Amino acid sequence: MTERDGRMRSFASIALIFVIQAICAVFFVSDIVLTVLGVRSSPVSWQTRELLEVGAALGLLLGLVLGGVALLRNFREARRVKGQLRAASGAFMELLEEKFGQWGLTPAERDVALFAIKGLSTADIAGLRNTSEGTVKAQTNAIYRKAQVSNRSQLLSLFIEDLMADGLPGVEASEPAGDQSGAR
């Protein structure tokens, strides 16, 4: 079964739960309203009435159980996705450290590179590191030279390309839709 089939089955189950609970709720509410207003079109035998009430109560209980199962599945899926996100974050940090080591970045250059990859401006990086903007610019130029790129977007693209090419450890890769040839 594909992931899409699973989502469709889950949606169909939740829709069925909703319909069952709606029918049962309409039965009980209409019964109360008709009793309060004293409106009865035709008398219903007590056996039939009891069977309808038992059926509606069972429907509500079934809805409660199936709703609990759906909620449990959603919690498990959220936990799985959170784990994958944690793995992806860890893999990205490992990749950063690996590249920084390959390029021979100093500790100060590593800090500046990390802040630059996070999208901070030169002024923001200088403020965080208690240095001048000129120092940050010089360190940024050294990073670009060592990484053999000419700007921040090219620096970031090195990491994105590596993550896309290698996949993330501990994270299941999904086939991209469309071209399956593997060409980039």
Image (cartoon, grey):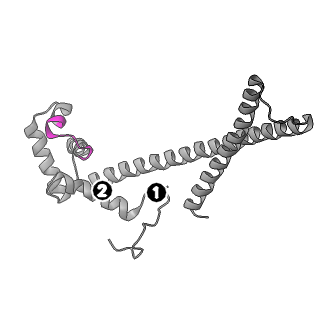
Q: Main secondary structure of the magenta part?
A: helix
At 70% from the left and 35% from the top, the residue drawn is 25
Quarter of the image for residue 150 reads: bottom left
The quadrant the N terminus occupies is bottom right
Q: Which sits in the foreground, 38 or 64?
A: 38
At 67% from the left and 40% from the top, the residue drawn is 22
At 75% from the left and 42% from the top, the residue drawn is 62
How would you rate the neighbour count of disc 1 (Cα within 10 Å): few for under 14, some for 14-19, many for 20 or more? some
List the single residue furthest toward the left: 134
Above or below — where is 39 with respect to 144? above
Q: Which sits in the foreground, 94 or 2?
A: 2
Question: Quick check: is 119 in the magenta stretch?
Answer: yes
Give the residue at mark 2: 159
Quarter of the image for residue 148 reads: bottom left
What type is the residue that disc 2 sits on? Phe
Question: Quick check: is 167 in the magenta stretch?
Answer: no
Disc 1 to disc 2, C-alpha distance: 15 Å
What range of the chain is rendered magenta?
A: 117-125
The spot of residue 26 in percent (x, y) is 70, 37
What type is the residue that disc 1 sits on? Pro
Secondary structure under tag 2 reads helix
Residue 103 in the figure: left or right of residue 140: right
